[in-house]
Image (cartoon, grey):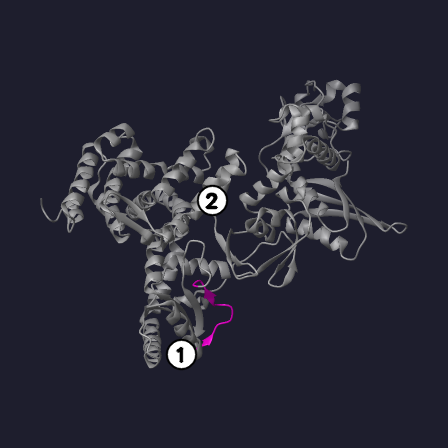
Amino acid sequence: MSNDTPLARLLEGRNDQERERISAAWTLAEQCGALEPEAAADSCTTLTTLEADAATHAAALLLPAVESGLLDLPTLHEKCDGEVAALAEGAARMQLIEALHEKEGSRLGSGTEGLRKMLLAMIEDVRVVFVKLAQRLTLTRRAKHGDPAERERIARENLDIFAPLANRLGIWQLKWELEDLSLHALEPDEYQRIARLLEEKRGERETFIHQVIEELRAALAAVGVHGDIAGRPKHIYSIWKKMKRKRVDFHQVFDVRAVRVLVDDIAQCYTVLGIVHGRWSPVAGEFDDYVANPKENGYRSLHTAVYGPEGKPFEVQIRTCEMHRESELGIAAHWRYKEGGGGRDQGLENKLLWLRQLMSWKGEGEEAEGFVEHFKSEVFDERVYVFSPRGQVVDLAAGATPLDFAYHIHTEVGHRCRGAKVNGRITPLNTPLETGDRVEILTAKEGEPSRDWLNPHLHYLATSRAREKVRSWFRALDYDKNVAAGRTVLERELHRQGLKVEQERIARRSRFPKLDDFLAALGRGDINSTQLSALLQEFAPRPEPALPTVDEHKARKFQRRPGAVEIQGVGNLLTQIAQCCRPAPGDPIVGYITHGAGVTIHRADCNNALHLASEQPERMIEVSWSDGGGDTYPVEIQVTAFDRQGLLRDVTGVFSDLKLNVLAVNTRTDESDYTAHMTFTVAVNDIAELGRVLDRIGALPNVREARRKV
């Protein structure tokens, strides 16, 4: 065999057993017609940098054949030894996470069994992740000169799935390259701009870094510390992300100029930190101690930024050689392969803890939706790192609130939570947390969750695990109490929306056909306010319309406003919204043909419309809301509240936050009981948006009621 072939390069330096294992996998993949030699060699090269063993390389060679169906599982297990076959099968299961990214729930099968099997394969042998990530990196590299649409799809999946997964497992070596290649595909102009700025300043930056390294090396030598000091590689995606997150220019990013110091032990890390801070002035707010408080994925290092020569800021990372190896290889650094079986150390077990926690989901709620949602938030979402009062680092999904933090600490802490301090200040429970925040939860001796916490419009909970804990609490309540609570919720929502709907009819159209079961589900939070609003749109009484015969000349005379209302069985007609009931998109509607003014659109349950239908049925016409157009519609909102200073400002602030146009305001205060009565005419897109407005206003302090006025 020539030493220049991909297979020969792959076998170089291996023992006989390893050569035999890899050669057998290569031959089988070739026989299946699924082997691309250069791509296979590239994936295996990546695995070599992760210090993967021969079985992992063999599985990577067979993965394309298994995923494409050219090699079925029975044949795989027949032709290969058990270890290689299990790795290839486990890696193939990871195609499921691409289905999650595309939100194709049907591809997950009925329930979550496929997803659980994938997680189990990752826990049992984490090398399946190495195989998949190596394959993904090869695919991304080869897509660089391929079809633009396919390249963009691959890049988006990388940023949404595979780079976060590599980050969660601490494999930064692969994470950075996946991110940089994906940014180049999705934002080529931004990528090139940052690359050009880096290149333009390279000479100046290298001179600066060389000076810093020489000064720091001399300072360390003076106290007897030997450290390996070098400039840190610049990852364009990291620079771009920091510019976007902090809203700063390229020249304001500190780690464009950066050095890394590797020392022998942890004590020397802090010695070097003291020398750095003693020699150069620290930049406020730019110090992170990930040695004392490692990140959730196990990353450890000291990070600081200082003002160096000529007052230019630069970043310094300080870590031991062991920490550096772990930061590059992540979970791969903890894999210890032993002949006859896989050995694991405690570091590996710690890094797999979050996967084991995912698998324990079944104990808190068995709904497939919740499990899938939780998996996606744990793996794909951006993360924030906050501190407990004792300095413990808590890893949460981006957007998490103090209430999410409370439920992360303990379920009972969440249930009894009544307030929170963030960085020493009392903060609303729905305030999004940021990395570096110190969070303290204020609890009552006895307490219970609020149903408002499950309202998605109020943003109390951002993590699926916390929401499931609240739902579980309500599920545990007595059935009769849940029914009563659900009836209260339904009646309040019907009143707020100004609808007259029989409760039995609503239940029959839900997934709980029995009224009491429907009310119980509503009472325990299984049906949230958004789902209820969507359900209510279908259930206003609608009279059976009679289609009239319309004079063709009169029909041509009027032109219907585009994108508003569809006229069934008739040409274009002028339409206008009835001022008596002011229907909004989503309301059941009916049309009335006027003399000389086109068709007036009423809500189907409008008293005037019902009267006209009984008196002049021949002039009623079937109409429906159009899908397009982007029109807005005026609705009147009635707010009743105990008057206080700033009340009007807070209510109008809700409209401003939701970018809604206020057409009219009328407000008065009853001085006998200080009750404020406020009426707002607001332009909304549809009834769902109206529900969001009512939820937000109803949550304001002193507001007793916010409802639609009809």
Instruction: Please state the horizontal and vertical placement of residue 192, each as a whole percent of the image.
Output: 36, 58
Indicate the amino acid at tag 1. Pro
Tell me the magenta residue range.
280-291
Depth check: give the residue in front, 365 or 464. Answer: 365
| Circle 1 crowding by C-alpha within 10 Å: few under 14, some 14–19, many from 20 | few
Instruction: Please state the horizontal and vertical placement of residue 704, each as a whole percent of the image.
Output: 78, 45
Contact flag, marks 1 and 2 (Cβ < 8 Å): no
Q: Nearer the viewer, mark 1 or mark 2?
A: 2
* Residue under label 2: 357
**How many numbered marks have been drawn onto this rendered protein structure?**
2
Residue 301 seen:
yes
| Circle 2 crowding by C-alpha within 10 Å: few under 14, some 14–19, many from 20 | few
674 horizontally vs 89: left or right = right
Instruction: Please state the horizontal and vertical placement of residue 497, each as a whole percent of the image.
Output: 72, 36
Quarter of the rendering containing residue 149: top left
Quadrant including the N terminus: top left
The residue drawn where x is 43% and y is 36% is 116
The residue drawn where x is 47% and y is 44% is 357
* Residue under label 1: 309
Instruction: Please state the horizontal and vertical placement of residue 375, each as a whole percent of the image.
Output: 47, 42
